[in-house]
Image (tube, rainbow, N blue to C red):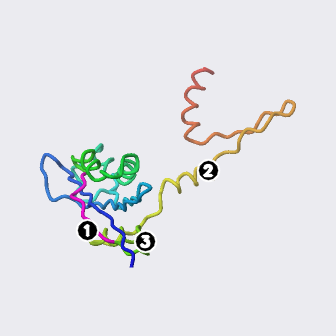
Amino acid sequence: MNIRRAQWAGVEFQPDLKHPGAPVRLGLVLYEPAKTGGRVVVIGRLPKSDSRPAAFKDTSPTTMQIAANWVTIMAKDAVDGAKEDLFARLSENWHWNLYVIEPTEITLAASADLTNRAKALFKRFVGEAFTATPNPSKKIATKLRARRSPAPRARLGNEVPHYTPQSWLIAQIAPHLAAHHS
């Protein structure tokens, strides 16, 4: 049986550095080295500013933004640099409120799926099953595209092109038009 080796490290968050309490376990980074650079999975919970968990009640807005976006930011850091010192580099970059704990080596079966293993490690580390929620930014972008007003049509003769701006754009333009016509 072919065995693969990997490393994982938990990601914790300290909501208040002035009055430290128990850290909040947000997720983990799983790295499987390979000759071509390896594969990285970053998986975790994302606390939101508008519905803060109790542990984040006194967290500043800036720090809250870091906590709410840590998966994307840390995944970019993980992919951008050299992989042979991945966890040392992440520990150097992330050592204040959000930090990576000491990595642990694990073995994977040849047929093991890295994402499924990350989900199992997440459950063991965080204490709850990982459930992916749909990406709200994709839904918002789709809704905006669906509500977008038609593009201006080319002029034919004296016809004025039809264009209705979105309501937020009207609110931005209307005060300027009123000032010019008075």
Q: Would you place residue 71 above or below residue 157 in this image?
A: below
Q: Is residue 93 above or below residue 127?
A: above
Q: Tell me if label 2 and label 1 are in contact, CB under 8 Å.
A: no
Identify the mark nearer the N-term, 3 or 2: 3
Which sits in the foreground, 70 or 8? 8
Determine which quarter of the picture holds residue 126. Answer: bottom left
- Residue bounds of the magenta highlight: 99-107
Q: Is residue 87 left or right of residue 156?
A: left
- Which amino acid does the dot numbered 3 rest on? Asp
Residue sitting at x 47%, y 57%:
136
Q: Mark 1 Cα within 10 Å, few/some/many (few <14, many 20+)?
A: some
Give whichever of discs 2 and 1 has the lower sequence position. 1
- Which residue in the protein does label 1 denote? 125
Disc 2 element: helix
Residue pointed to by mark 2: 145
Residue 155 is covered by the magenta coloring: no
Q: Which mark is residue 140?
A: none
Q: Position of residue 73 (x, y in %)?
A: 37, 48
Closest to the camera, between mark 3 and mark 2, is: 3
Residue 69 location (% of width, % of height): 36, 51
Q: Amino acid at mark 2?
A: Arg
Q: Quadrant of the N terminus?
A: bottom left
Circle on res. 113? 3
Q: Secondary structure at mark 3?
A: loop
Residue 104 highlighted magenta (yes or no): yes
Q: Residue furthest left?
A: 19
Q: CA distance from mark 3 to mark 1?
A: 18 Å
Asked if the residues shown at circle 3 and circle 2 are in contact, with their CB atoms under 8 angstroms apart, the answer is: no
Give amino acid for label 1: Phe
